[in-house]
Image: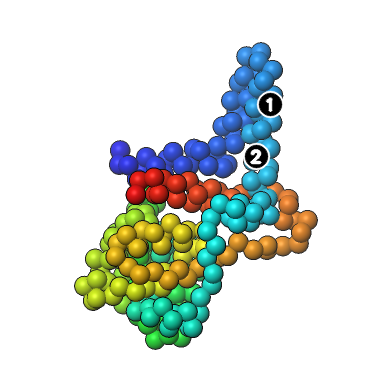
Amino acid sequence: MEAGLLKAIVAALVLPPAGPLLLAFVGLLMLRAGRNFGTVIGTIGLGMLWFLSCHAVSIELARALLPNVAPVGLVELRRARVEAVVVLGGGVLPEAPEYGVPQPSAPTLQRLRYGVRLARVSGLPLAFSGGAGWSGRGTATEAEAARLVARQDFGFDIRWVEGLSRDTRENAVRTAALLHRDRIRRIALVSDAWHLPRATLEFQRAGFEVLPAPTGQPVPTSGPIFEWLPSGEGLLASRRVLREWLALQVQRWSA
């Protein structure tokens, strides 16, 4: 088993919702075995699942655990003397019956839209990097879907397309192989705000000067009461933040 696939499996078991649910299950087994401490363990697991499902908690986690990444515009692109805009994939829908062809997932589409916007207002060329990912089905790549949508829906052609990478490190290495041939060194890197701190480090290691260009900033999306009620959106956001924090620790430790 490849290391990347093993990391993806371990992360799926440790992060919410699986991690807290496994903790609650262990508590239940302890309780059935006559150990009263199992009640405490089970309650902790269920409590973690409840709070991590609140969008307000995910926002506070992002602020506490991840570096802040500010939005950018034309002024910042020019100040950093950016030479190209690079968009990172965030998932692909291998089956989209309403379109008849694979489509970018919601995060990928959000990143692509912002990347096209930056490239269009600045006149800079656009690159896209993204394969099927370690957990993908392998039947379609983010790059294939992004190139089609950029052309058909946004009327914009992506100059460099990389569709073999399976994780952020491979994004950086394979994109460098493409862009360095054209002497591109200074880039604006587009991804979600929670993903950019780690992605920026990987692209810097690959030889780029990086201006982070975030999408999906951690901000409230509904009224105060609902922000503190469990939701699928809140759980997903907390999972992403915790995953990136853990990945950052591994990345820094292995540097």
Nearest the viewer among 135 and 238 is: 238
Q: Which residue is mark 1?
A: 40
* Quarter occupied by the N terminus: top left
- Local packing at callout 1 (Cα closer than 10 Å; few below 14, some 14-19, many 20+) is few
Q: Position of residue 228 (x, y in %)?
A: 73, 52
Query: Among all residues in the image, which is located at the extreme left?
Result: 181
Q: Residue at x 40, y 49 (%)?
A: 252
Element carrying mark 2: helix
Query: Which comes before the other along the chain, label 2 or label 1?
Result: 1
Q: Residue at x 24, y 71 (%)?
A: 180
Three-letter code for the amino acid on which mark 1 is drawn: Val
Number of marks present in the image shown: 2
Three-letter code for the amino acid on which mark 2 is drawn: Met
Could you say which quadrant of the image residue 32 lies in? Answer: top right
Q: Position of residue 118 (x, y in %)?
A: 46, 79
In the visual, does 148 lie left or right of 30?
left
